[in-house]
Image: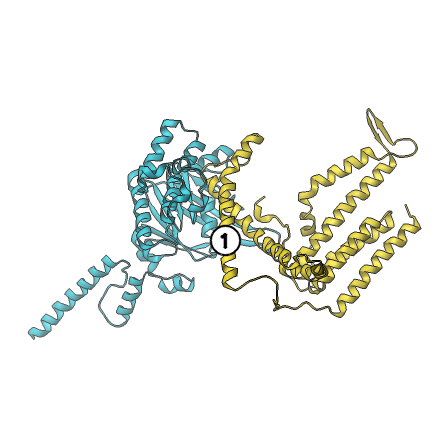
Chain colours: A yellow, B cyan
């Protein structure tokens, strides 16, 4: 897999309803969704949440493939969680499987299944946000939503600026890494074989040039920003103003409704 | 003559199956012969960088084959590894890949990876440093203390030290001042003549290509529309311009002269050839006007 194929935080441009929602709405919806996800206790609740996600993916038209690809890096964590839950959840009654020190109860299977579902839904919905929202809109929205913290003298603007710069440079640095890696491979460097120590040593020809170029870029960016009289968020205006539309209020209401529905489904106690 | 480096129906697709899918190379057939000085020209995004990264096995073809000295470089892991040493690739702005404490250590990185012994490494480092005109005093300095042009020469020496049979350079003169450009070009020429190596240079400077290359390959939209001697390729001036490329300034001047009715040969592309052509034209004119005067 080439480094270029990493989908972390990648934006798929589009004009669907999900793309057009105000980014603040989308962040709030994500919060609602995650809250609902942690409230869910039974199949009905999880079913509702899974259906919501499927619906959202269909509306966004990014495709299930892209969402699933985002799952790749956390595959190990998902498996690890599943195994731990499977083995260490105590249950009442007879274990379903008892073998040597391994005892698997019905409750273990249930917890493991729901845990895996929870992690997968959590990651998918986060990815859906970054797939449908450009990084710039995302940080603008965060700055706006965190505006209240400004009163507590938290440097919200600076934090948002740092975040947008960091996001902006992820693809650049990935490209740079790819390039330096190719250049060193062309000189016979081997990043894939050997033991751990050997591989760590093999990273030096990659990391040294990468750090040097990152510092150089940071320096150049700072100069470019100062040349354009950047001096923090004070009195700074925006070309693109964020504005809530009717669809945002409807979406937020639906988000709240989802939370309530999941809470109600807990009371029903199905499965 | 059998080619030292050859591609057969080479195709490459980036990000297959995503909205960003891009066909960078389409059925490219390319040959390079021993001792040849080959120029590859194409504008940004034409697929030239993708092409050269296939030639030493950095990228794996989506379909098609790459042969080095007649052997498929993807036949085995060892074959790929050997291809990287037989075909040296100098990337664009290679000075950003330097990492060692001293110039000497940086140049020896390639030979060390080849598993050579100390004496051989030492010979190669000194020889390649000499090829690029770096004095011995520089070898113990940190590469980060050098000037831009010197850094680039260190990086090129790092590849030359592997003594590749084919040396590929991607825009080796980009961003250098005229003196730096001349130095790099003559370093490459020295390696070419001393080792009878095949040189492949990627560039979009038509002047530079016209002066140095024996054969030119034009690449556009992942295909090769023209492949031949500089004189033949530059005859397609209009097509080249429609691909966002140009012809050397001399060729353009002579095409205009021809259009204005001057009796010159328009297929010139260097200043030396231009001088010859003008002298020839003046001579022809001189004889005809002499005759006129006599009547």
Q: Residue at x 43, y 49 (%)?
A: B93
List x then y, in percent, for residue A43: 86, 48
Tell me which corner region of the image, top left, top right, bottom left or bottom right, holds residue B196: top left
Q: Is residue A30 visible?
A: yes
Question: In terms of depth relative to the viewer, which is nearer, B174 or B62?
Answer: B174
Question: In terms of depth relative to the viewer, which is nearer, A208 or B67?
Answer: A208
Classify residue A96 as left or right of residue A119.
Answer: right
List x then y, in percent, for residue B59: 51, 44
Q: Is residue B69 visible?
A: no
Name, please, the residue furthest toward the left: B294
Tell me which corner region of the image, top left, top right, bottom left or bottom right, holds residue A77: top right
Q: Residue at x 38, y 49 (%)?
A: B148
SS class of the residue under badge 1?
A: helix
Classify residue A34 as left or right of residue A200.
Answer: right
List x then y, in percent, for residue A238: 62, 68
Query: The disc numbered 1 marks a residue on which chain?
Result: A
Q: Quadrant of the C terminus of chain B?
A: bottom left
List x then y, in percent, for residue B79: 47, 34
Tell me which corner region of the image, top left, top right, bottom left or bottom right, holds residue B131: top left
Q: Quadrant of the N terminus of chain B?
A: top left
Q: Residue at x 77, y 38 (%)?
A: A82
Please name the residue that numbered disc 1 is placed on. A219
At label 1, counting other C-alpha atoms closer than 10 Å, the crowd grade (few under 14, some 14-19, many 20 or more) is few
């Amino acid at each position: 897999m080439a480094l270029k194929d990493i989908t972390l935080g990648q934006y798929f441009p589009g004009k669907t309803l999900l793309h057009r929602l105000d980014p603040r709405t989308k962040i709030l919806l994500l919060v609602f969704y995650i809250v609902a996800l942690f409230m869910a206790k039974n199949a009905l609740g999880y079913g509702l949440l899974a259906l919501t996600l499927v619906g959202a993916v269909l509306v966004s038209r990014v495709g299930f493939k892209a969402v699933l690809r985002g799952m790749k890096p956390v595959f190990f964590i998902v498996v690890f969680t599943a195994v731990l839950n499977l083995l260490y959840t105590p249950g009442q009654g007879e274990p379903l499987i008892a073998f040597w020190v391994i005892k698997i109860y019905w409750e273990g299977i249930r917890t493991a299944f729901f845990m895996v579902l929870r992690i997968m839904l959590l990651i998918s919905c986060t990815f859906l946000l970054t797939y449908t929202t450009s990084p710039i809109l995302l940080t603008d929205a965060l700055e706006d939503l965190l505006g209240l913290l400004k009163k507590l003298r938290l440097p919200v603007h600076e934090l948002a600026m740092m975040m947008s710069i960091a996001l902006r440079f992820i693809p650049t640095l990935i490209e740079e890494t790819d390039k330096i890696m190719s250049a060193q491979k062309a000189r016979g460097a081997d990043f894939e074989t050997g033991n751990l120590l050997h591989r760590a040593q093999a990273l030096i020809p990659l990391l040294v040039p990468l750090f040097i170029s990152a510092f150089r870029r940071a320096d150049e960016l700072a100069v470019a920003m100062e040349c354009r009289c950047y001096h923090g968020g004070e009195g700074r205006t925006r070309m693109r103003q964020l504005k809530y539309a009717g669809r945002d209020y409807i979406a937020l209401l639906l988000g709240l409704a989802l939370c309530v529905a999941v809470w109600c489904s807990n009371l029903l106690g199905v499965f | 003559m059998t080619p030292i480096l050859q591609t057969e129906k080479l195709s490459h697709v980036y990000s297959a199956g995503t909205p960003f899918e891009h066909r960078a190379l389409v059925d490219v057939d390319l040959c390079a012969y021993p001792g040849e000085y080959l120029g590859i020209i194409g504008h940004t995004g034409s697929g030239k960088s993708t092409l050269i990264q296939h030639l030493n096995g950095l990228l794996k073809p989506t379909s098609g084959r790459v042969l080095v000295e007649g052997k498929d470089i993807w036949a085995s892991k060892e074959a790929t590894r050997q291809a990287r040493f037989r075909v040296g690739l100098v990337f664009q702005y290679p000075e950003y890949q330097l990492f060692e404490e001293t110039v000497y250590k940086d140049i020896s990185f390639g030979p060390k990876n080849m598993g050579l012994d100390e004496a051989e490494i030492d010979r190669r480092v000194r020889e390649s440093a000499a090829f690029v005109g770096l004095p011995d005093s520089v070898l113990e300095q940190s590469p980060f203390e050098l000037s831009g042009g010197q850094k680039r020469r260190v990086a090129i020496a790092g590849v030359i030290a592997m003594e590749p049979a084919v040396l590929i350079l991607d825009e080796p003169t980009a961003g250098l001042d005229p003196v730096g450009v001349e130095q790099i070009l003559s370093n490459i020429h020295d390696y070419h003549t001393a080792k009878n190596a095949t040189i492949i240079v990627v560039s979009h400077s038509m002047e530079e290509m016209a002066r140095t290359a024996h054969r030119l390959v034009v690449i556009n939209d992942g295909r090769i529309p023209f492949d031949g001697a500089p004189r033949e390729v530059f005859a397609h001036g209009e097509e080249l311009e429609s691909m966002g490329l140009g012809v050397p300034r001399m060729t353009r001047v002579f095409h205009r002269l021809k259009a204005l009715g001057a009796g010159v040969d328009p297929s010139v592309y260097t200043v030396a050839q231009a001088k010859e052509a003008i002298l020839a034209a003046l001579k022809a004119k001189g004889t005809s006007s002499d005759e006129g005067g006599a009547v």
